[in-house]
Amino acid sequence: MTDQLRPIPTIMRAAVARTLGQPLVIEDVPVPTPGPGEILIEVIACGICHSDLHAVDGDWGTPPMMPLIPGHEVAGRVAAMGDGVTDLQPGQLVGVPWMFWSCGTCEWCLAGMETICPSTESTGFSKAGGYAEYLVAPAAFVATLPESVDPIAIAPVLCAGVTTYRGLKRTGLRPGQWLAVLGVGGLGHIAVQYATAMGLRVVALDVDDEKLALATSLGAERVVNSRAADPVAAVRDQLGGTHGSLVTAAAPIAFEQAVGLLRPGGTAVYIGLPGHARDTINTSISRLVESEITVRGSNVGTRLDLQEAVDFAVRGRVAATVRQVTLDDVNDVFADMRSGRIVGRVVLTPR
Ligand SMILES: [Zn+2]
Ligand SMILES: [Zn+2]
């Protein structure tokens, strides 16, 4: 039984992937019903992440649920609550990230590494996401958002924000140390801001001067156009290498460069995902050994990371560069994304 709080339609509009690799179809589908411990959320805004494209293209080996409603950067209001939900209020602003649910009882959940729980469910991948007027999510896994935030502005923080924030934590860098951010797209332009807010010094690398100009405006002290110069040589010449690097780009070469441009003892953290077809890199074993280089993966963020990442945004230290579109524009945005034409983040609203 659901404690319904205001009139909710039975049918909603959604962007649905019915065949892998094909355009999304805008259609009417049933509004889902929250089960025990779940809430129904009226979507206000949903960021369009590059991972959504990978999901609908079937790029990751594991196929998504089909048909699939993508979207995992969802800001909205609690519209109805299932049985047993006591810590949220009707109408409350909440955010739904990629990590839809984790088991809470496995070795990794117990260790505070719920992002690598083997049983985890993913919003807009194994569960219906936010390219719709409504979605259902477990109450225990949503982020609570203060009324002061703009849902459109906060949406990208729920994936791009938390993912870069956790990645930065996993570099282990201290204030004053140099970080290389490889790729200044949806993730990278937010990474520059978190890094700066955390007291790190940033060199940003990209192949697009417009994106590098954005990085400079957001706090990067240096930029390198990876197409114009050998980025490894440029960073080593200018800075003697960086203490850490964060790869948000999708090109495998960036993952190799992220190791090459480190100074001895440095740490590279990978958060970008090139996709299943080009999932390997070449790197020098002797360099890893002799220079004690660390390479770490980082996968979205825990609930604690999410709440901390949101807090930076609420305090105005981090803001995504956002362009707003509606559900009907989603295939055009995907086309722009395929050709790398997006600066910052695109956020859709249901209407
Ligand atoms: Zn994402
Ligand atoms: Zn688990």
Image (cartoon, grey):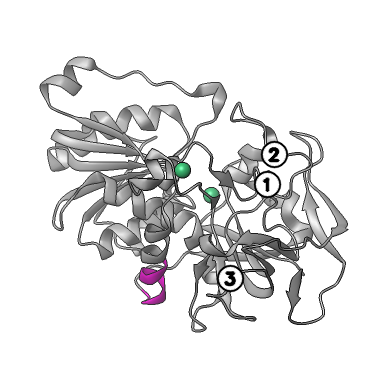
> Few, some or many C-alpha atoms within 10 Å of disc 3 (few <14, some 14-19, many ≥20)?
many
Question: How far from the left and from the top, in percent, is residue 256?
Answer: 33, 27
Looking at numbered disc 2 in the image, what kind of residue is underneath it?
Answer: Val
Give the Cα distance between marks 1 and 3: 19 Å
Looking at numbered disc 1 in the image, what kind of residue is underneath it?
Answer: Phe
Give the Cα distance between marks 2 and 1: 10 Å
Asked whether 309 or 246 is in front, the reply is 309
- Looking at the rendered structure, which numbered label has been put on residue 152? 3
Pair 1/3: label in front: 3
On screen, residue 266 versus residue 153, left or right, reads left
Residue carrying label 2:
56
From this view, report whether residue 22 is shown above or below residue 160.
above
Give the Cα distance between marks 3 and 2: 23 Å
Which region shows up in magenta?
A: 310-316
Looking at numbered disc 3 in the image, what kind of residue is underneath it?
Answer: Ile
Q: Quadrant of residue 35?
A: bottom right
From this view, report whether residue 65 is shown above or below residue 14.
above
Picture residue at 73% right of the left edge, 54% below the top: 330
From this view, report whether residue 75 is shown above or below residue 112.
below
Of the image marks 1 and 3, the number of the one nearer the N terminus: 3
Picture residue at 71% right of the left edge, 39% below the top: 65
